[in-house]
Image (cartoon, helix red, strand yellow):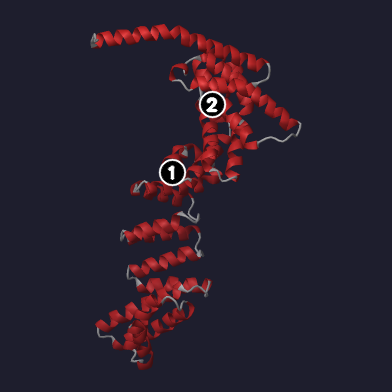
């Protein structure tokens, strides 16, 4: 048996390919002809299937003839769907929107291969493009986030497709930022940080939803463990939207966890400059001052908060702890009389906290233990001692 060398094998393979090429081309020509006949007779689904099968082969994906017939088949299907909708006949809404998305994507691909037909194809698909946004909203309502994302992404990216360059979508279409926002939202719902971040810059141009966009971006940074950019996003969000529910508490948490109480206090002061009666902002400043051992100031802000809303439990705890810590300091300085007075005040607030939050034993019991011990309140001390044991 003759053994072939490497060069001989390559030559044989080339000869076989050249021998097969006319057969393949003939088969392709036959299928194209068949598909065109299907389109003429209104059998658009059959034509679509033939072209879809051809495009599964990598060698066919640069053939503009196949894409053109595929596009014509899809247009025919779209006309049928439109007619059914016009006549108010039953039609699959999801299938209708998916058909439009496929039609736009195929038109964009065909344009990259045959730009000489751009004007005609762009006019045709400019009419269809608004339904990409509508299709995205349809799938959002169904909570089908991946499907919705694809629609919004196709809508946004059309702004940079040569097919649509004459329409200047990026500067003239106010829905582009809205679609980018919804794409960001869908990425967030899928907990996919890459998809959440992909269109963030365009999404932020939708000023009505910019606060939510920054929230989704911050969460995506956390998913990626990018704490530096997470903090930067919180800072930007708080600067732009100080009263939005998301940014302030998380920014305070970051600085507190890092022991940067001066920064936390500066954030609280900035927030109070915007709204000096906010219970959240007042409580944050009261708590930060307590952590900084600025007890007199902490008590002042705690009292201010209670004057606004006396039903809040946590200010009672903060004030009680501030007085307890003041009493302990005075006691260590030999100021026994002043210390006792501070413990008495601490007792009032801590017992009020206990009354409002009976299940928070881990917070009020140790404090009351210290208070009752220093006030020589034997019966009350014994009760707390038993609870702690």
Specify whether residue 339 is in view.
yes
Which label belongs to residue 105?
2
Q: Is residue 214 above or below residue 331?
A: above
Instruction: Depth check: give the residue in front, 314 or 84.
Output: 84
In the image, residue 276 lies at what x, y percent?
49, 63
Residue nearest the observer in this picture, 27 or 349: 27
- The quarter holding residue 126 reads top right
Q: Is residue 325 above or below residue 373?
A: above
> Which quadrant holds residue 349?
bottom left
Q: Give me the C-alpha separation between circle 1 and circle 2.
A: 23 Å
- Dot 1 falls on a residue whose secondary structure is loop
Quarter placement of the C terminus: bottom left
Is tag 1's residue or tag 2's residue first in the polypeptide sequence? 2
> Which residue: 53% across, 71% down?
308
Tag 2, which secondary structure?
helix
Q: Which mark is residue 264?
A: none
Residue 360 coordinates in the image, percent (x, y): 42, 75
Left or right position of 56 against 295: right
Task: Answer left or right for 21 relative to 81.
Answer: left
Quarter of the figure with residue 302: bottom left
Residue that mark 1 sits on = 192
- Residue 166 visible within the image: no
Q: Residues within 10 Å of mark 2 (few under 14, many from 20)?
A: some
Location of the N terminus (image quadrant)? top left
Depth check, front residue: 214 or 387: 387
Closer to the camera in the image, 64 or 154: 64
Q: Residue furthest right?
A: 87
What percent of the width, then of the height, locates residue 263?
35, 58
Looking at the image, residue 290 lies above or below residue 184:
below
The percent coordinates of residue 183 (x first, y second) are 51, 40
Q: Which residue lies at the image location 39% right of the left edge and 7% below the top edge?
A: 18
């Amino acid at each position: 048996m003759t053994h072939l060398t490497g060069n001989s094998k390559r030559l044989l393979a080339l000869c076989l390919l050249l021998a097969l090429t006319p057969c393949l081309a003939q088969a392709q020509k036959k299928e194209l002809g068949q598909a065109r006949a299907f389109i003429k007779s209104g059998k658009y689904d059959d034509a679509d299937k033939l072209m879809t099968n051809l495009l599964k082969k990598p060698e066919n994906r640069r053939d503009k003839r196949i894409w053109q017939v595929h596009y014509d088949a899809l247009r025919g299907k779209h006309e049928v769907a439109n007619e059914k909708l016009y006549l108010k006949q039953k039609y699959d809404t999801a299938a209708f929107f998916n058909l439009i998305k496929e039609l736009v994507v195929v038109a964009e691909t065909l344009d990259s291969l045959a730009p000489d037909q751009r004007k005609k194809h762009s006019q045709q698909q400019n009419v269809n493009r608004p339904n990409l946004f509508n299709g995205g909203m349809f799938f959002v309502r169904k909570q089908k986030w991946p499907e919705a994302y694809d629609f919004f992404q196709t809508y946004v990216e059309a702004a940079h497709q040569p097919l649509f360059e004459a329409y200047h979508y990026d500067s003239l279409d106010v829905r582009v930022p809205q679609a980018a926002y919804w794409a960001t939202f869908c990425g967030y719902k899928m907990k996919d940080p890459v998809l959440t971040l992909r269109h963030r810059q365009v999404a932020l141009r939708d000023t009505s939803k910019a606060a939510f966009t920054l929230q989704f971006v911050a969460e995506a940074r956390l998913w990626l463990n990018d704490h530096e950019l997470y903090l930067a996003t919180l800072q930007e969000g708080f600067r732009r939207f100080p009263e939005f529910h998301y940014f302030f508490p998380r920014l305070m948490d970051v600085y507190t966890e890092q022991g940067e109480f001066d920064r936390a206090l500066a954030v609280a002061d900035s927030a109070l400059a915007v709204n000096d009666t906010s219970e959240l902002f007042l409580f944050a400043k009261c708590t930060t001052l307590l952590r900084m051992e600025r007890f007199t100031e902490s008590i002042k802000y705690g009292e201010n908060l209670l004057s606004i809303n006396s039903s809040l439990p946590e200010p009672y705890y903060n004030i009680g702890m501030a007085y307890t810590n003041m009493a302990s300091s005075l006691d260590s300085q030999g100021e026994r009389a002043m210390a006792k007075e501070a413990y008495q005040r601490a007792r009032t607030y801590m017992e009020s906290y206990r009354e409002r939050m009976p299940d928070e034993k881990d917070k009020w019991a140790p404090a009351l233990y210290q208070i009752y011990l220093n006030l020589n309140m034997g019966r009350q001390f014994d009760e707390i001692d038993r609870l702690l044991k």
